[in-house]
Image: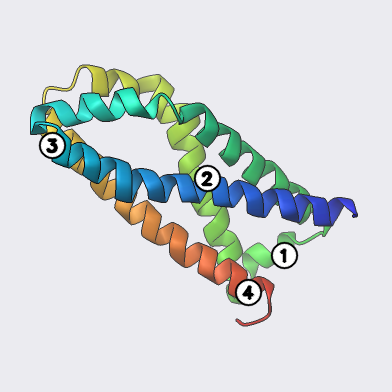
Amino acid sequence: MDDFTFARVLHVVSIVGWIGGVWFVTFVIMPAIARAEAPADRLHAFHKIEQGFSVQAKVWVLLAGASGFWMTWRGDMWWRFAEPAYWWISAMFFLWFVFFLMLFVAEPLFLHRRMDNSKTPERDFHLMVQVHRVLSVIALVTTMGAMAGAHGLI
C-alpha cells in the first residue's frame, strides 16, 4: 500500500469516527437527555457526558485534517479548491475548520465555562441541539458529495 492510499484509508476511517460520533450525539444522546432531564438540567447533563468522548472527537478531527492535508499536498491537488466542480473539497475543509475551531478554540477558551455558568441553560441546550443538527446535515451533504465526486459521479 502506498502512502496516498494509506492516507485515504486513514481519512475515511477518521471521518466515520468523527461524523458518526456527531450523528450519534445529535440524534441519540441529545434526544435521550431531553427525555430524561428537566430542561434546566439538560446542559449540565450533556456537559458531563461530553467529557467522555471529547478526546475521541479531537483525535478524529486531527486525523481527518492531517490525512486530508497529506493527500492534497501529495497529490498536488490545491487547484481543486478553486474549481466549482470540486465544491465538496472546499465543503470538507469548511466543515473540518468549523469543528477544529469548536474543539480546539471555542470549547477550551469559553464554551465550557459558559456551559458551567449558564444563566439560560434551557435556551443554551436548545441552541446547541440546533447547531449540531445543522452541522450534521452539512456533514451528510458534504460526505455524499465527496463520495460521489471521488468516484466520478459528479
Q: Which residue is mark 3?
A: 123
Indicate which label's residue lies in the foreground, 1 or 4: 4
**Mark 3: which secondary structure?**
helix
> Does residue 56 appear left or right of residue 151 in this picture?
left
Residue 120, x across and y down, in percent: 11, 28
**Distance of label 2 from label 4 (alpha carbons):** 20 Å
Q: Report the residue that reaches farthest toward the right.
A: 2
Tag on residue 149? 4
Q: CA distance from mark 2 to mark 1?
A: 26 Å
Q: Do we see residue 74 in this rendering?
A: no
Identify which residue is drawn at 24% across, 18% down. 116
Mark 3 vs 4, N-terminal side: 3
Residue tagged by mark 1?
A: 79
Quick one: SS at disc 4? Answer: helix
Q: Residue furthest bottom?
A: 153
> Which element carries disc 2, helix, strand or loop?
helix
Relative placement, left or right, of 124 versus 95 is left
